Image (cartoon, rainbow, N blue to C red):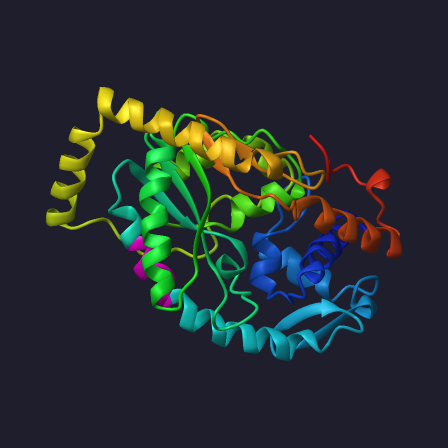
């Protein structure tokens, strides 16, 4: 295979880890390569004699040969995503109204339209004002608990300050998380996050913007006034004391989980990343096994597929 054909196959193999066949447009956008390629070039590569025997095509989806069942699974998950997406925007709007919240983005499986069921979690990344990560998260937990009363699971599982947008862990899993998130509030901060993580383009050069362009759900006049009032009350010494109290309380509570061998959690003054069971490294391990199966080991790739 040439460079592009190998890149297309890598992209499909990574998606296969999640049981997710791709459209041609998605292959182009999320292409794992060390240089950009056009969608026309992707189309030609998919028909190449080297690649075509390794693939299956069903209902506009592309997957590796022997995985044709994924087309029906994706249709089911598309239907689940359609129902969940309305909820994700609704609760994203509520999160945007919270004091000190500056950006809300849908992430995880739903951002790729690949939820496991109609009641899957609504995962979010929140960016907050500097020095108010823990207070903003505390307000978000109130939304989590209220949503639970309605049978909806809201998960703001990554909360970070606007001063901590550059990601310290740099591998394909994190690059994909960055490129697949869908900002629904705070588009300017999303763009700043992309700017501060230029390394992502060395892994996924075509994914320069969000794949899904969602309408922004900024708070209306009343909620902006309420938000400003709350931030005024909690923006000084009182807020500093409450922030420090909440930080100490939660770090003490979660210290045992932080010491677990599979934890990827990060709890500090700028980040609340509650990933106590790391999904990234197992995903990359399964992906590398598939690479090896197809003769595309990390050693013969120019991409830094794992590690920092």
The secondary structure that most of the magenta stretch takes on is: helix
Q: Quarter-wise, where is residue 258 in the image?
A: top right
Q: Quarter-wise, where is residue 40 in the image?
A: bottom right
Residue 5 point in image, percent of width and height: 76, 55
**Of residues 23 and 178, which is closer to you in this image?**
178
Q: Is residue 121 left or right of residue 50?
A: left
Q: Residue at x 43, y 61 (%)?
A: 153
Q: Residue at x 11, y 47 (%)?
A: 221
- Using the rendered image of the protein, determine whether residue 216 is visible from the camera's viewpoint: no
**Of residues 239 and 167, which is closer to you in this image?**
239
262 relative to 20, above or below: above
Q: Residue at x 21, y 29 (%)?
A: 234
271 relative to 37, above or below: above
The number of discs equals 0
Residue 141 point in image, percent of width and height: 37, 48
* Residue stretch in magenta: 86-93
- Using the rendered image of the protein, determine whether residue 99 is visible from the camera's viewpoint: yes
The quadrant of the rendering that contains the C terminus is top right
Q: Is residue 29 left or right of residue 9?
A: left
Residue 92 magenta-highlighted? yes
Q: Quarter-wise, where is residue 57 in the image?
A: bottom right
Q: Residue at x 59, y 66 (%)?
A: 23
**Of residues 108 and 291, which is closer to you in this image?**
108
Residue 223 point in image, percent of width and height: 16, 48
Residue 210 point in image, percent of width and height: 46, 50
């Amino acid at each position: 295979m040439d460079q592009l054909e190998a890149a297309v196959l890598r992209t499909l193999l990574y998606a296969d880890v999640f049981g997710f066949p791709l459209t041609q447009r998605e292959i182009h956008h999320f292409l794992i390569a060390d240089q950009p390629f056009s969608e026309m070039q992707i189309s030609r590569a998919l028909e190449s004699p080297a690649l075509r025997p390794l693939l299956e095509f069903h209902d506009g989806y592309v997957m590796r040969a022997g995985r044709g069942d994924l087309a029906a699974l994706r249709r089911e998950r598309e239907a689940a995503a359609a129902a969940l997406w309305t909820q994700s925007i609704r609760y994203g709007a509520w999160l945007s109204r919270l004091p000190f919240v500056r950006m809300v983005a849908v992430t995880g499986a739903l951002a790729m339209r690949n939820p496991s069921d109609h009641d899957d979690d609504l995962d979010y990344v929140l960016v907050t004002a500097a020095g108010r990560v823990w207070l903003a998260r505390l307000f978000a937990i109130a939304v989590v608990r209220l949503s639970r009363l309605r049978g909806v699971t809201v998960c703001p599982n990554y909360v970070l300050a606007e001063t901590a947008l550059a990601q310290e862990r740099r591998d394909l899993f994190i690059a994909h998380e960055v490129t697949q998130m869908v900002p629904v509030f705070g588009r300017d901060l999303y763009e700043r996050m992309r700017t501060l993580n230029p390394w992502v383009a060395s892994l996924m050069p075509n994914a320069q913007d969000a794949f899904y362009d969602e309408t922004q759900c900024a708070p209306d006049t009343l909620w902006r006034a309420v938000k400003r009032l709350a931030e005024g009350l909690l923006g000084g010494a009182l807020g500093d004391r409450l922030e420090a109290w909440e930080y100490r309380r939660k770090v003490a509570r979660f210290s045992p989980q932080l010491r677990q061998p599979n934890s990827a959690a990060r709890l500090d003054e700028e980040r609340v990343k509650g990933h106590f069971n790391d999904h990234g490294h197992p995903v990359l391990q399964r992906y590398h096994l598939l690479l090896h199966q197809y003769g595309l080991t990390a050693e013969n790739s120019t991409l830094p597929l794992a590690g920092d």
